[in-house]
Amino acid sequence: MAGPSTKWMGALSRSGSAEAWAPRALLLVTLLTASAVIAGACSGDDDGLPGPQDGTGGPDAGTGAGDPCVDGQEVECHITVGEHEGVLTCMDGIRRCEEGRYGSCEGTLSMRRSPLGPSPRGSDESGYPRPLANSEASDGGLCATNPCDPSCQSFEETPDGGPIDLSGTGTTYTWSVGDINELPEDVARQGTHQPCTTSEDCQFDQYCEHPARGACGHDPCETGLSLLSSCSGCVAKVCDAQPSCCTQTTIPADCGHDACEDAPGAATHMTATCGDTCIANICASNPLCCDVRCTSAAQCQAIFGANFTCPLVPSGTPRRCRPNSGVCPPGSVSTDGKCTGTWSSDCVDLVATRCPGKTCAPPTNYWDDTCVDLVNELCGSSCSTDPDQQRGLCKAYLPNQTDATCSGVDLTVGVPCGGTIPVCNRGNTPAPAGIAIHRYPAGAGQLPSSAPGAVLDSCSPSGGTLACTTAQPIAPGECISVAGCAGVADGMELIVNPPGAGQIAECRCENNGSIYQSAMCESPGCIATASVSMIRPVTLFVALDRSTSMWETSTGTPVFNDRWIPATNALKEFFRDPASAGLGVAFRFWPHDNPGPCNDTPSGCPPAGGGGCALPLVPFDGTAARRLTEAAAPVDQQENALISAIDSFPMPYGDTPMYPALDGATTWAINYKNAHPEEEVAVVFVTDGIPSHCDTVPNHIGNLAGNAFRNHGVRVHAVGFGNSNAEIINSIADRGGGQAYNLSAGASLQGGLLDALVSIRGEALPCDVTVPLAGVTDPASVSVVHVDGAGTETTLTPRAGLGSCGSGWYFADATNTSVKLCPQTCSDLRDSPGKVRATVPCVTTSLTSITTSWERYHGVCPPGTKTQWGYLRYRTATPGDSSVEFFVRSADDPDDLDGATVRLAATAHAAPTDTRICDESSTPPCAIDLFDVLEELPDARTEYLEVQMRLNPTSTGGGGVQVQDWEITYSCPDSE
């Protein structure tokens, strides 16, 4: 918006005569209740309705030095009591002077046809537009706020080009915002999730700069292998739009695997009834492809030959066939002395003839340039080409900044302050006026979310209530301060442009949220001088398979050098890594009965929740003393406990009870997350086999991971090698929102597993902060502050570089664009969750009050009547302790106005009483009675009235003060 010298000064300097400037009448009616109309229109009656406004009932209404009336003197009054179907109920009477003051209106009620016709339907009790809602000037007419008074006229003012703004020299802004860097941590975390992966993670007028990798196999901003759809919120959007970018896990129903997988070993869960038509067709064609079960010897002999029998079973439970002597025939395998089929390549070949429409051609899915482009388009993120740039930061938009990828409108909501809500347009097309802002109860969970199951439906909040609408268009890169929003309170969730009537098209709606706050306002320029990194401690539950297959094959061939030794060495190296400092780690083997039974024998499978499988061999209690540190064991107590547990390992033995093992691991992680909601909690599940005993259905196992992720925010990462099934590993990770690693046993396993663990640790432990732009050119001005969960601030010590570190921080490189915390400080701060803020001093322009020129109004009345000034109504925005003062003066001769008494009519401010909006939508009605302000007669009955406004900045010189519009009314009673 332009400043006063270019926009509204000229509009407000017009001389006022009926000939030079015709009155702009606003035909508006508000029929709230009879009492509301009377109180706002003619100041009372004698039928128990509210009495007159005496100059103190309006927003800080001022008084002047006018003459008192003469006792017994009378003036005419007309009151609109109500309207129905175009019929008015009116009170016509007089106000009588008593003790030097005019009293309430006394008269009789009558009914007559409204000259305005029936009120339109669709807005409260009356469908007429509310005062000040119409920006179009009329050529004059009845005062629609009181149609019972045939002489009432109205001037409605909306300044040319937009509201009057308090501006000044230098860089100033016409809006104010709350300081996002000073938000309480619990509020900040509702709308800022770092490392961010998509725009849903960055509310409060922020965007996600270079989305983090999350749990994906590679950076989504780079081409590479296809990604699991649940590895990040951004990837979920891309996969939904372009499935070829992603890996699809395809295990059908209760089957063991997809029909296209060549799986050696028993064809467990590959049956005609597992829930897949293709598999059922192949089982019918060749039973030896499937898991053969019997209830009679005849069934076994029909498939395997005369030398087979069906073991006796209780209640007819199907069992596998057993040879009376010898071995299983070709095409089948032996398990526990019984025979069953195996899904070989011959079975896969049958897909072509037995499964119409299905093909086993190798997947061609790939994360190519099209997928990368979709990251920028769908995720509200910017992919950086700088390989050293920190990933996953939510960055506040700078004043006048737009999203280059958005050619349309992109609305955001900044941090509310001082009773106003900043609404911004980060697109490149102007946003129209009249856009709704809805409020939701605190903690309603309606802000856009990147959570699984919500990210594809993040633009559909429900249960909101209209708080207010934007009163003017918003230019690209600009913001406006919206005042007068109804029913808002600290902590409430806010959404601009919600679904429903009046919603406009946007480039994206995933960043339209904020949390209402009533803190002091700041200049938008100062918000850009700070950058914050949220610190979240990370805790892992590591569950390591110690089944017999980790040590030797079923025939006794040793494989420990290919599986057990490299796997445990990788874990020990990871625990010793100084870069793991700050991690919380709980650990257990499975199957293993220490510290509780986590096995499938001798007492059966563990109960729901995993039973003993949820008890870690090496516990972690969340305390700082038990987190990994840079120091080596035994100084690092947790590292010492973890290494000792592995070095004194129990000999690998047992089957692979995967379901209870994962059930227990996720149960521990969920319980820990519930007790420590501020932490990132994940499960790392490591196995070399396929499920045996207990519940072995792959989809049931995957559902455990899905429950942990979708319902509790616990990611589940899966690592498989040896005899593991890639589909099961992918399914666990995909549903668990984690990473899947299908590695090879042997010489490469140790390095591969270590890389996987480092990747899982990855971006969850950031210890660097982006430097504000002003600090890049003036590094000496940068300061770094840690704010803990209690709000206590600690200024950290700057260091010359990593070599100079003890505690404190240093610049990452010569570009001065990023700050890194010294390793010890990083470790210490992870024990004290909070945020780290890099700041530079904010150079602001201190504003001073401005006073408008006098705006002149000429009341034109017919012969025998005289102009009597009625009411002032207005709408303003006054952030913080700023204010707007309205002054009036009157005279019969325009030459006498300069010497007329100037009276303060009203002061608009946010506190101690909220008087920023004074129109017919106000509750209670608060129109300023100019008859009282002008001290009644004679000054209230003059031909000319002038209005002047003074816009006062905040006590710290902040702006954002606006006069949006106002209305002046008058009537023409009989002259005396």
Image (cartoon, rainbow, N blue to C red):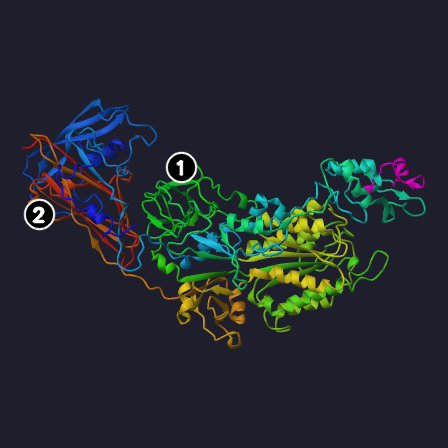
The residue lying toward the viewer, choosing from 716 and 351, is: 351
Q: Is residue 774 left or right of residue 71?
A: right
The segment highlighted magenta reads 289-311
Q: Quadrant of the C terminus?
A: top left
Residue 143 placement (x, y as % from top left) = 20, 32
Q: Is residue 66 left or right of residue 322?
A: left
Which residue is labeled 1 in the image?
502
* Identity of the residue drawn at 62% across and 53% down: 738
- Give the amino acid type for the residue marked by disc 1 in the picture: Gly
Image quarter of residue 723: bottom right
* Identity of the residue drawn at 6% across and 35% down: 73
Residue 115 placement (x, y as % from top left) = 21, 25
Residue 961 placement (x, y as % from top left) = 28, 52
Answer with mark 1 or mark 2, whichever residue precedes in sequence.
1
The answer to whether residue 398 of the structure is visible from this angle is yes
Q: Is residue 354 above or below residue 563?
A: above
Q: Is residue 140 left or right of residue 338?
A: left
Q: Counting other residues with Cα less than 10 Å from the Cα at mark 1, is it few (<14), some (14-19), or many (20 or more)? A: few
The image's mark for residue 900 is: 2
- Give the amino acid type for the residue marked by disc 2 in the picture: Ala
Marks 1 and 2 sit apart, C-alpha to C-alpha, by 47 Å
The residue lying toward the viewer, choosing from 269 and 72, is: 269
Q: Secondary structure at mark 1?
A: loop
* Identity of the residue drawn at 36% across and 60% down: 526
Is residue 290 rendered magenta in the image?
Answer: yes
